[in-house]
Image: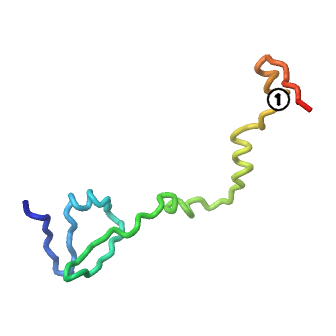
Amino acid sequence: MNPPRSRVGERGQITIPKQLRRSLGIRAGEDVEFELRDGALVVRRVGASDPLDRLVGLVDERLDVDAYLAEARGPAWSAGRDAAKAGRRPARRQK
């Protein structure tokens, strides 16, 4: 079986064969780096970044995360209030 091939264009551009892109997880717009090693050109995917890094800077407004979570979760658990909702007597505190 012959290894995948690609032709160098006039501007020095090559196309990485689809099967190699897939196996390495290289997608359009991602960076690769080149290295000359023992007379061979080695193409390597630049270290995969954390997907969350792409989200940094998307939101312009400041947000107090603790306040947001408190609002989203509702009031904290309370023995008196929550036991009454369940039809039970509140548990006594041990001394």
Instruction: Say which quadrant the N terminus sits in.
Output: bottom left
Please tell me whether residue 23 is drawn above or below residue 88 in the rendered image: below
- For the point 16% across and 76% down, which residue is it? 8
- For the point 48% across and 61% down, which residue is it? 50
Relative to the observer, which residue lies in front, 54 or 93?
A: 93
Residue 95 position, x and y percent, is: 92, 32
Q: Residues within 10 Å of mark 1 (few under 14, many from 20)?
A: some
Judging by the rendered image, the residue that carries numbered circle 1 is 79
The quarter holding residue 83 reads top right
Please tell me whether residue 3 is drawn above or below residue 90 in the rendered image: below
Residue 90 position, x and y percent, is: 85, 23
Residue 17 position, x and y percent, is: 19, 63
Relative to the observer, which residue lies in front, 59 or 3?
A: 3
- For the point 16% across and 77% down, which residue is it? 9
- For the point 26% across and 81% down, which residue is it? 36
* Figure disc tally: 1
- Using residue 61 as the reference point, say whether residue 85 is left or right of it: right
- Using residue 8 as the reference point, say whether residue 88 is left or right of it: right
